[in-house]
Image: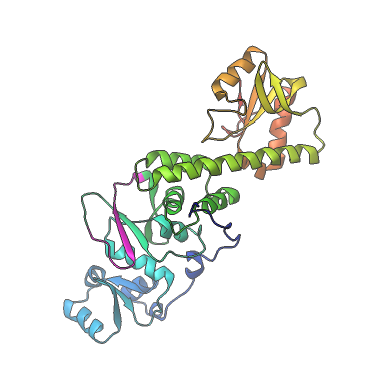
């Protein structure tokens, strides 16, 4: 049994963002250190405290008096601030250092893409560093592409696509359900996931995640095909047919009178169609027989009026106008 398979994720997810508006009592002060505590979920590192003017003795006295509580080595929580999932996740990144990046399931949760923070927080550091994992924190050594890294809510974190892929590789996460959720809600696009996966081939779990991504992409494309047919039927669009064969090429949906094939784009399985032929070959055959191909992205179904307008232009022969790759006529 695939331990990544699980029931679908809930549609409403309690996430890290829910705690962002909370303000600790430490925020009542106006001094820079109090503001830092408030901005960091009640946390401070020893280096930050010293940089804000405290002496080593002053830091130690606060620790001895339990005004500050150690969370990790050289990372402290203000006693007036209650521990939370946000502070637990943030503390792991603070402990790992300035060049550490929040990754994996914890990063997906930080972006609001998982309902709960994982028990173990994964941080990624450059290969030149070798900090050891500790209780509640898993350290991975990997040189991330700068494209995959950003800052969100004060934490250096993997961008959503990379966070989702890393999170899906976690055995404790329902990977298939996570991918279906982010693709179904449009939180992350298939193309973004495919590009992120290509940049991180060889990373921990990339082979398994690649197979899960291919399956999720196929499911998205199938739902989009059904959704497109339902949209055309509901709006009374005429002259379209399904399962049309042209010179041995099987078309899922076509407007025969206009010699227009409509293809739902699947970036993972783009090379092979329902008839087992490659997309480039299929389109070349269609061109030789006077047909055009309109490629539709699954995300276009979220804007039905724009999609119908594009289809109308393609069927009637009018220029599609600017709009990028989503709905481009490949002919």
Q: Quadrant of residue 14?
A: bottom right
Looking at this view, is 72 or 170 the one in front?
170
- Residue at the far top: name it: 288
Q: Tell whether 179 sits left or right of 75.
A: right
Q: Position of residue 153 (x, y in %)?
A: 42, 61
- Residue at the far front: name it: 1
Q: Position of residue 34 (x, y in %)?
A: 34, 76
Q: Quadrant of residue 201?
A: top left
Identify which residue is drawn at 69% across, 18% down: 246
Whether residue 63 is in magenta: the answer is: no
Q: Can you see residue 40?
A: no
- Viewport quadrant of the C terminus: top right
Q: Which residues are magenta?
A: 131-146
- Count of labels in the image: 0
Q: Is residue 270 above or below residue 209?
A: above
Looking at this view, is 322 or 267 the one in front?
267
Looking at this view, is 233 or 23 the one in front?
233
Secondary structure mainly formed by the magenta segment: loop
């Amino acid at each position: 049994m695939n331990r990544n398979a699980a029931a679908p994720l809930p549609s409403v997810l309690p996430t890290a963002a829910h705690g962002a508006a909370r303000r600790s009592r430490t925020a009542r002060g106006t001094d820079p250190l109090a503001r830092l505590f408030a901005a960091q979920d009640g946390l401070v590192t020893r280096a930050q405290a010293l940089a804000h003017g405290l002496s080593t003795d002053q830091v130690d006295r606060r620790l001895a008096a339990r005004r500050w509580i150690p969370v990790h080595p050289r990372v402290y929580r203000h006693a007036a601030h209650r521990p939370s999932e946000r502070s637990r996740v943030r503390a792991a990144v603070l402990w790992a250092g300035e060049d550490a990046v929040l990754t994996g399931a914890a990063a997906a949760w930080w972006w609001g893409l998982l309902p709960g923070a994982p028990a173990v927080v994964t941080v990624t550091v450059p290969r030149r560093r070798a900090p050891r994992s500790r209780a509640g924190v898993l350290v991975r050594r990997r040189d991330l592409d700068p494209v995959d890294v950003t800052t969100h809510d004060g934490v250096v974190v993997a961008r959503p696509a990379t966070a989702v892929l890393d999170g899906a590789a976690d055995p404790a996460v329902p990977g298939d359900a996570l991918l279906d959720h982010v693709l179904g809600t449009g939180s992350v696009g298939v193309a973004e996931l495919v590009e992120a996966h290509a940049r991180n081939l060889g990373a921990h779990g990339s082979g398994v995640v690649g197979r899960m991504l291919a399956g999720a992409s196929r499911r998205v494309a199938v739902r989009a095909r059904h959704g497109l047919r339902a949209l055309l039927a509901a709006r009374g669009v005429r002259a379209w047919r399904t399962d049309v064969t042209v010179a041995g090429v099987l078309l899922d949906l076509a407007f025969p009178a206009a010699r227009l094939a409509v293809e739902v784009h699947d970036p993972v399985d783009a090379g092979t169609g329902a008839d087992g032929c490659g997309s480039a070959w299929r389109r070349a055959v269609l061109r030789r027989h006077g047909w055009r191909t309109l490629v539709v992205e699954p995300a276009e179904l979220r804007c039905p009026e724009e999609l119908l307008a594009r289809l109308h232009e393609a069927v009637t022969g009018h220029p599609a106008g600017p709009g990028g790759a989503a709905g481009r006529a490949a002919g």
